Image (cartoon, rainbow, N blue to C red):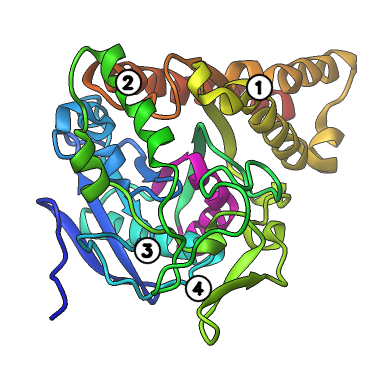
Amino acid sequence: MTQPPSLYPNEVLTTIAEYPTLYYFQPSTTNSTKPLIVCIPGSIHLARIFYGHTPQNFLTHHLNARGFNVLSISYPIESTPPTMPPTAPHFRIKDWGLQAATTAKMVIEQHALPASVILVGWSMGGRVLVPFTTSARDLGLNVELFISFAGTPGISGIRPNRYTGKGMPVCTRDGYVRVRGLERFYAQVEEMERLNGGSIIPRDVYEREYVGGCPVKLMGLGLKYDSEGGRFVQDEEMHEEDSRVWDFANCPLVSALCPNGVMDASHALADRATWGFILTYQLESLIGKEGLGRVTGTEKWERLLDLVRDAPRRLCWSVDGNHFFFIGEKAAAEVADKMVKLIHEAEVFRKELGEILS
């Protein structure tokens, strides 16, 4: 007999865009008209990493207190005990974007919220940027801002074996990538517990309720699941085609919170440059020939040049901690405060750009 799903209070397990979907919507403590914050988790993690089993230790609680409605969406994961049926080993990034955007549209309509979204992508969740944005726009939603949380964009070869070790990842019976790397991940959770001065997620709870097997196409490994052979094989579609990472014209304004801890050295060293690069080309695409045609005179051009060159500094910020810098009561509150300021800075930046191009 199939074991029933193991869900948290107020979680919703359903089928959206033809795939199993687990989502959690938490309204703000005020009657807010702010954009809906949509949180997308990284590899092998459920979106519980944003709201958790003890709310005060997680980001959603603190964003709610600051007037934001928050929607956290888990992509299909295979876990023990089960949280959703393991029926989506072929799930890919374009499916992910449509699933998450359709969920956001549904929740916005159900709760009569403004049709504006701020997208947060943690770790592997950075790969969904363009597919989510284009799907959301097709559904009538405005994606105002993307915030990378130690995010990885959909570029082949960036951290390709980060979660699976060297060589071919292990395929589970249902076609998902078998969970590996928990020691490395949980060591960072423990560091966040030390930095916050108390327990956040006990090890047994973490393994049982927060992680699971991942669809291989989401991970940028150049592999897909062959259901006939019951194994992973080379994928003929390039990862960049699936993630559309170079489609700068369909990016929203990009920003980032970048950890500064040595336990997440790769993101600490590279994230400002990575997301600063994408931000700069997004702005170049946004400005375009028409915008340049409105920049008359040396003064306006120099203002535009300075604004775009300064964009990565203004919109890509360092935060204390490691890959899990946003968990723990103290850290989550501090990150929520930084997000409020970063969202405001993005609004100011957008206004300055509009004035130059007007």
What label sits on residue 90 in the rendered view?
4
Image height check: is 199 above or below 169? Answer: above
- For label 1, the residue is 312
- For label 3, the residue is 76
Image quadrant in which you'd find residue 336: top left
User: Is there a contact, CB below 8 Å, between mark 4 and mark 1?
Assistant: no
**Percent x, y for residue 118?**
43, 40
Secondary element type, mark 2: helix
Crowding at dot 4, Cα within 10 Å, few <14 / some 14-19 / many 20+, comes out as: some
Query: What is the three-letter code of the residue carrying label 2?
Result: Met
**Percent x, y for residue 327?**
30, 27
User: Is there a contact, CB below 8 Å, between mark 1 and mark 3?
Assistant: no
The residue that appears at 48% across and 49% down in the rendered structure is 142
Secondary element type, mark 3: loop
Disc 1 to disc 3, how far (Cα)?
33 Å
Residue 136 belongs to the span the image colors magenta:
yes
